[in-house]
Image (cartoon, helix red, strand yellow):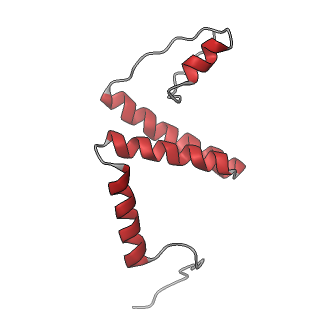
Amino acid sequence: MPEYNKLVRDRIPEIIEASGRRCEVRELNDEEYLAALNRKLGEELQEYLADGSLGELADLVEVVNAIVLFRGHSLEEFEQIRMEKQQVRGGFTRRVLLVSTVD
């Protein structure tokens, strides 16, 4: 049986078993969960950078949302912070590259 030891989406064990295979899972404690989420964030970022697909970007956002919720915040609060930063500093739609500054 291959060993993965990685965080997977909640329904993956159900999907594996529905295909006729068996799997072993365990629930992570808080410290393990946050570490696994952070690893998953890096993994999903690498997959998005390699593939560039909208699906990989959605996976990345799903992990970000899980981190937000785990840290005790709501997705609405996270979105509010994002919007406030956008209003004060702007977004990235104008494709501005800062080349240098002069003091």
Q: Is 24 located above or below residue 58 in the figure?
A: above
Q: Is 13 located above or below residue 43 in the figure?
A: above
Residue furthest toward the bottom? 103
Image mark count: 0
Residue 3 lies, in percent from the top left, at: 58, 16
Q: Is 27 located above or below residue 55 in the figure?
A: above
Which quarter of the figure has residue 76? bottom left
Residue 17 lies, in percent from the top left, at: 61, 12
Residue at 48% of width from left, 15% of height from top? 25
Q: Nearer the viewer, residue 35 or 15?
A: 15
Residue 59 lies, in percent from the top left, at: 57, 43
Residue furthest toward the left? 72
Q: Quadrant of the C terminus?
A: bottom left
In this view of the protein, can residue 69 be seen by the observer?
Answer: yes
Residue at 63% of width from left, 46% of height from top? 56
Residue at 62% of width from left, 17% of height from top? 16
Q: Quadrant of the N terminus?
A: top right
Which quarter of the figure has residue 15? top right
Residue at 33% of width from left, 48% of height from top? 74
Q: Is 6 located above or below residue 82 in the figure?
A: above
Q: Nearer the viewer, residue 42 or 58?
A: 58
In this view of the protein, can residue 2 be seen by the observer?
Answer: no
Which quarter of the figure has residue 82? bottom left
